[in-house]
Amino acid sequence: MHGPVRWLRRALAVLALALAVPAAADTVLRVAYPETENPPRILGHGAAVPDDKPGISVELLRLAADKVGVRLEFTRVPWKRCLYLLENGYVDATFHASYTEERTRYAVYPTRAGRLDTGRAIYRNRYAIYAPKGAGIGWDGQTLSNVGKPLGTLAGNAVADDLKRLGAAVEEAPGVRSNMDKLKSGRIAAYVEIEGIGDEFLAEHRAEFVEIEKLPLPLQDKHYFLIVAKPFYQRHPELAEAFFDAIRDVQATPAYRRMVTTYR
């Protein structure tokens, strides 16, 4: 009798393992990300996810998903709506999110020993200040000067709170074009934007915005993360942590480095 019992136990253990594997593979991670380009991290405008060259960050997440064994479903909407969808349970994750304490109410960042784990960030980028030439706006890395009007930011960007802490008034607008138009017409003193986004826009529309320049010093340097909705994390903590790990690990692989070179 002992032989059959041992065989049955082994068979049940193998069956349990086999059933556990598809659980991760069958899990869908619904990911919202901005419809605004952030070259080369996010490419393409609007709701569509490009079939070819969607951006380094999108491809990074696909490689991480393959490594972990989850399926991704992407949704592209304005950034502020990405956060709304995440907070209200319509999606499971979003990126590129810099750290704010407010977002930790409804989202989980990758952490290690209770501290933000920048080693598992998607990437690092800088916020630049764009202003009319000769406006005299100053930024020495600590203090803003000669700012008589509000500063513009993209709606939902965490940098708005940072600017308020520096004593600046802030006006948010839903797109790069609307902010640059406000800057050109003099309705705002300067526009603070992720450097890649601002530089790309001005390169494409240089003749129209020839009087706009970037100040020499960046406003700040930030890490950007995939963040996961708390309900998803509570249901799948090991899977979420494995995905955070995969984002880090994939960036160290030759395949990732080869992919990045195709965007240069």
Image (cartoon, helix red, strand yellow):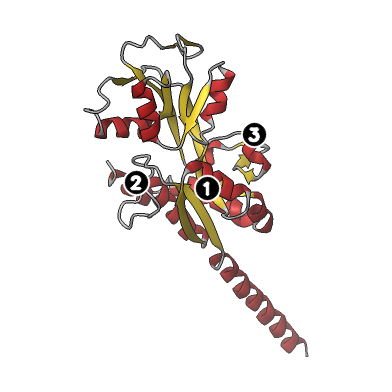
Q: Mark 2 points at which residue?
A: 43
Image coords of residue 27 (percent x, y): 56, 64
Q: Which of 175 and 123 is in front in this view?
A: 175
Check the image and report above or below for 155 versus 58: above
Image coords of residue 73 (percent x, y): 48, 59
Alpha carbon separation for disc pair 1 and 3: 16 Å
The earlier-in-sequence mark between 1 and 2 is: 2
Find numbered disc 1 in the image and state the secondary structure of the residue it sits on.
strand
The quarter in which the C terminus is drawn is: top left
Q: Nearer the viewer, residue 121 or 167?
A: 167
Q: Name the residue under label 1.
A: 94
The amino acid at mark 3 is: Glu
Q: Nearer the viewer, residue 220 or 25?
A: 220
Alpha carbon separation for disc pair 3 and 2: 28 Å
User: In the current view of this chain or complex, which residue is farthest to the left?
Assistant: 207
142 left or right, relative to 205: right
Q: Name the residue under label 3.
A: 101
